[in-house]
Image: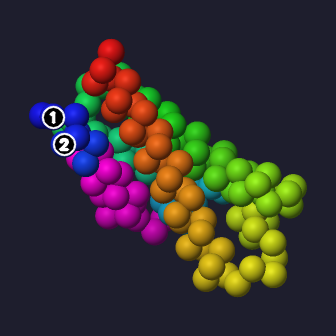
């Protein structure tokens, strides 16, 4: 498979794992500071990562898993947005509280996807070129 096809496949697998496979329980609990939250994030990241075995070897898939877990579990996107906006809090996903909720959610979803796709693209590039 050509590298460009692997990139496209990785993008589609990201969409599959984050939007089709992930269920409501995973999505609503994965960031909670509880054992259930940890378990929900773990299950989400496992089910997210498994399809990547079709295009990557297991060591690359472990990195896909690890980066996805770190981003989702420890609110990296929220903290990035808060830092970028100078808010110092991840309340309202790091955006000012005056921001309309629909806009906050869409901006958060877009930035979250960029984080995951960037990580996956780097992993694909590294494992396909080294």
Q: Is residue 95 above or below residue 13?
A: below
Residue designated by label 2: 5
Q: Which mark is residue 126?
A: none
> Residue at left 53%, top 48%?
115
Query: Could you tell me which secondary element the residue under label 2 belongs to?
Result: helix
Mark 2 is surrounded, within 10 Å at the Cα level, by few (under 14), some (14 to 19) or many (20 or more) other residues, namely: few
> Residue at left 30%, top 20%?
129
Q: Please name whichever residue, 46 or 34, is drawn nearer the observer in this view of the structure.
A: 46
Question: Residue 79: where, in percent of width, then height?
Answer: 73, 51
Residue 90 seen anywhere in this rendered image of the structure: no
Which span is picked out in magenta?
9-25
Q: Please name whichever residue, 124 or 31, is drawn nearer the observer in this view of the structure.
A: 124
Query: Could you tell me which secondary element the residue under label 1 belongs to?
Result: loop
Q: Is residue 91 above or below residue 14?
A: below
Q: Is residue 63 above or below residue 31?
A: above
Q: Is residue 56 above or below residue 83?
A: above
Question: Residue 59: where, in percent of width, then height?
Answer: 35, 22
Relative side of 15 to 45, left or right: left
Mark 1 is surrounded, within 10 Å at the Cα level, by few (under 14), some (14 to 19) or many (20 or more) other residues, namely: few
Q: Where is residue 32, by image quadrant?
A: bottom right
Question: Residue 107: where, in percent of width, then height?
Answer: 59, 69
Question: Residue 102: where, in percent of width, then height?
Answer: 61, 82
Q: Please name whichever residue, 4 or 55, is drawn nearer the observer in this view of the structure.
A: 4
Relative side of 22 to 116, left or right: left
Quarter of the picture containing the C terminus is top left
**Mark 2 and mark 1 in contact (Cβ < 8 Å)?**
yes
User: Is residue 69 magenta-colored?
Assistant: no
Residue 50 seen anywhere in this rendered image of the structure: yes
Q: Where is residue 112, by image quadrant?
A: bottom right
Residue designated by label 1: 2
Relative side of 57 to 118, left or right: left
| Majority SS type along the magenta span | helix
């Amino acid at each position: 498979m050509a590298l460009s096809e692997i990139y496209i496949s990785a993008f589609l697998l990201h969409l599959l794992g984050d939007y089709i496979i992930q269920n409501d329980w995973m999505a609503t609990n994965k960031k909670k500071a509880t054992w259930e939250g940890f378990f929900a994030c773990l299950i989400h990241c496992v089910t997210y990562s498994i399809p990547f075995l079709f295009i990557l070897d297991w060591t690359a898939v472990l990195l896909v898993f690890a980066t996805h877990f770190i981003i989702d579990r420890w609110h990296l996107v929220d903290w990035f947005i808060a830092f970028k906006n100078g808010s110092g809090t991840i309340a309202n996903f790091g955006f000012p509280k005056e921001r309309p909720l629909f806009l906050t959610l869409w901006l958060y979803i877009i930035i979250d996807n960029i984080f995951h796709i960037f990580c996956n693209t780097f992993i694909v590039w590294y494992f396909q070129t080294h």
